[in-house]
């Protein structure tokens, strides 16, 4: 296999491992965020349910205020609270969309409160208006106040239904919190394991690549470059470091080249006898 191919494959494996580890981290983080959002949504739904109970109490207080005073200005808080109740219960339904049990509870609450208003509050308000116009005494006023015991039962049932709704949401939130902790633990360990695997593979590939390159080069590149420079200057007596070790790759080829150059230099250099004969001839 060519050196370039080996280097490319080594870096490609490291890149793939890093990509997989990053994908695992990204996916796990998204799951954690989504799980955390579900837990926060449960907390918000509990707060909204409590706010719904507060609105119901405002409805009852506004109703009682009108019955006691027969003043029409007390109807404004009642109208506002009724509109707020409808808006908040619809928002709460959307918050638990997909949970048919909780939606059914909210529908029962809505039905009970609306039934209380239609069968108790509004008839009682009308009776109080009539009593006020007739300037009725205390007995008539008390009669108006005590009208519609069935509606009161509906109101209390609706309040209890919200309590049941809240307890169910709390139980689900506890389960979600526990699941979040398990998910976070798995995420941490997956990141640690992925990092360890990537480091081990990366280290192994680094060592393999270094060994392969060293094998192809045959030694330290700086040393081989220095030897090549000395050979280029005509110094055939230059020595490689580590004479006891067999060279490989480029170093081995340079050692063969250096040996050949030495041999050629010896064969082409004049002997002492040839030099003497040449000297005699030249003097004569």
Image (spheres, helix red, strand yellow):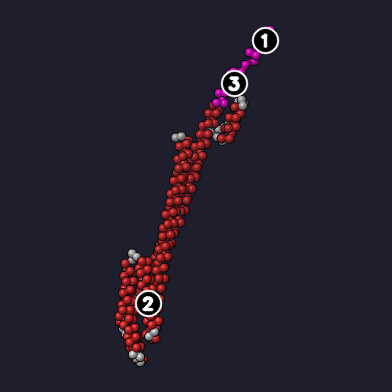
Q: Quadrant of the N terminus?
A: top left
Residue drawn at x 42%, y 57% is 30
Q: Main secondary structure of the magenta part?
A: helix
Q: Is residue 44 above or below residue 6?
A: below
Q: Quadrant of the C terminus?
A: top right
- In reply to whether residue 271 is colored magenta, the answer given is yes
Residue drawn at x 42%, y 65% is 40
Q: Position of residue 193 (x, y in %)?
A: 45, 52
Earlier sequence position, callout 3 versus callout 2: 2
Whether label 1 touches label 2, CB < 8 Å: no
Q: In the rendered structure, find residue 79 and report the number of the disc placed on it.
A: 2
Residue drawn at x 53%, y 31% is 250
Q: In the rendered structure, find residue 282 and report the number of the disc placed on it.
A: 1
For the record, the magenta segment spans 257-284
Q: Secondary structure at mark 2?
A: helix
Nearer to us in this view, 170 or 144: 144
Residue bearing the label numbered 3: 265
Mark 3–mark 2 distance (CA, rounded to whole Å): 115 Å
């Amino acid at each position: 296999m060519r050196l370039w191919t080996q280097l490319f494959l080594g870096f490609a494996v490291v890149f793939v491992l890093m990509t997989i580890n990053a994908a695992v981290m990204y996916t796990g983080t998204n799951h954690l965020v989504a799980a955390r959002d579900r837990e926060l949504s449960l907390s918000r739904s509990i707060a909204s349910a409590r706010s719904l109970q507060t609105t119901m109490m405002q409805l009852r207080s506004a109703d009682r205020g009108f019955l006691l005073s027969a003043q029409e200005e007390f109807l404004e808080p009642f109208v506002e609270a009724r509109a707020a109740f409808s808006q908040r219960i619809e928002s709460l339904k959307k918050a638990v969309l997909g949970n048919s049990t909780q939606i059914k509870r909210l529908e029962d609450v809505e039905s009970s409160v609306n039934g209380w208003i239609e069968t108790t509050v509004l008839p009682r308000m009308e009776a109080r208006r009539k009593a006020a116009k007739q300037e009725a005494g205390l007995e008539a006023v008390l009669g108006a106040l005590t009208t519609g015991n069935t509606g009161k039962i509906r109101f209390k049932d609706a309040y209890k239904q919200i309590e049941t709704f809240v307890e169910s949401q709390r139980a689900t939130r506890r389960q979600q919190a526990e699941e979040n902790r398990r998910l976070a633990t798995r995420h941490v360990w997956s990141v640690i394991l992925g990092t360890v695997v990537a480091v081990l593979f990366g280290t192994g590939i680094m060592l393999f690549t270094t060994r392969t390159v060293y094998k192809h080069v045959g030694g330290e590149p700086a040393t081989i470059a220095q030897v090549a420079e000395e050979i280029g200057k005509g110094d055939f007596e230059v020595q490689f470091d580590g004479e006891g070790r067999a060279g490989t790759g480029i170093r081995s080829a340079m050692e063969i080249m250096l040996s050949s150059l030495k041999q050629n230099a010896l064969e082409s250099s004049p002997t002492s006898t040839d030099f003497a004969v040449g000297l005699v001839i030249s003097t004569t």
